Image: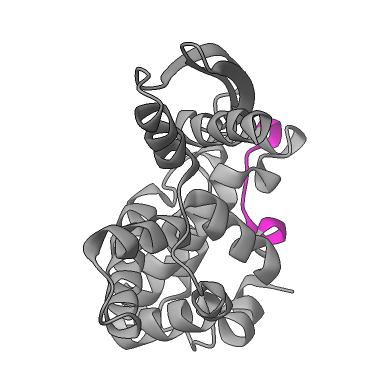
Amino acid sequence: MTALDFIRQTLGHEPNDMAMFELALTHASAGGENYERLEFLGDRVLGMVIARSLYERYPKEPEGKLSRRYNALVARETCAEIGRELGVPTLVRLGKQAREDRAGQSENVVGDVVESLIGALLLDGGLRAAQGFILKAWGPYLDEQVRAPEHPKSTLQELAAARGLKAPVYEVVSRTGAHHAPVFTIRVSVAKLGEATAEGSSKQDAETAAAEALLAQLQ
């Protein structure tokens, strides 16, 4: 599928400025201008649309539960999962080394490109176009949220507090991989409770995975 076909068929938009969308698909490794500014914009638009949707869907929920739903929906993992479902990885424009390193499959890159495409939709078609895409692509994820998810780090912290223990401590064990596709290894420990180690494509992702691993040990 060409980039133009993707914009028309998958995003449901007839582009006025195709160069804008080509930029949204261009990684920094390709040299010259890249998607980072559009990704910055798209991230904010995604947050606004998801926040409003949750506010309207769950009129009686307190801020804490709405925040947990929001964080799960705008997380890099969710953006990347949606990007893969849409076929984004095959369209990302990469430099030679990044392509050989399979950066196009990276959770960070795929998630960023999804957000940059949202930014391009906003600029090229207005808020209605960007919002329409977000509500369609995120629709199944919104519908699946019967209960507000508990974030693993919050759950672990609450567990430690309930047992009268100090808060969890997160340490960076290592950072490996290419600059555009890093792998962080994080160890989390709770005194008198245990510790666990996990990897992720960002420190936040690795901390979340480590918290999940420690909670699994304690079940």
Image position, residue 134 (x, y; %): 45, 77
Looking at the image, residue 76 lies above or below residue 120: above
Q: Is residue 25 visible?
A: no
Quadrant position of residue 194: top right
Q: Position of residue 60 (x, y in %)?
A: 26, 79
Instruction: Please tell me whether residue 211 is drawn above or below residue 76 in the rendered image.
Output: above
Q: Tally the numbered discs.
A: 0
Instruction: Name the side, left or right, on which 131 lies relative to 106.
Output: left
Whether residue 47 is in magenta: the answer is no
Q: Residue at x 53, y 53 (%)?
A: 111
- In front here: 1 or 113? 113
Q: Residue placed farthest to the front in the image?
A: 163
Q: Is residue 47 left or right of residue 89?
A: left
Which residue is drawn at the image coordinates 46% and 57% (left, top)?
72
Depicted 5 relative to depicted 183: above or below: below
Residue under the image location 51 percent in, 36 percent down: 208
Residue 171 rendering spot, x and y as whole percentages: 47, 13
* 215 vs 93, nearest the viewer: 215
Asked whether residue 57 is in view, the answer is yes
- Considering the image in quadrants, where does the C terminus appear? top right
Instruction: Please say which color scheme the image uses.
Output: one colour
Bounds of the magenta segment? 89-97
The quarter of the picture where the N terminus appears is bottom right
Q: Nearer the viewer, residue 159 or 169?
A: 159
Locate residue 173: give its quadrant.
top right
Say left or right for 94 vs 163.
Answer: right
Q: Residue at x 35, y 22 (%)?
A: 164
Q: Which is nearer the eye, 70 or 41?
A: 70
Indicate the position of residue 126 as horizontal and vertical percent values: 29, 83
Residue 96 in magenta stretch? yes
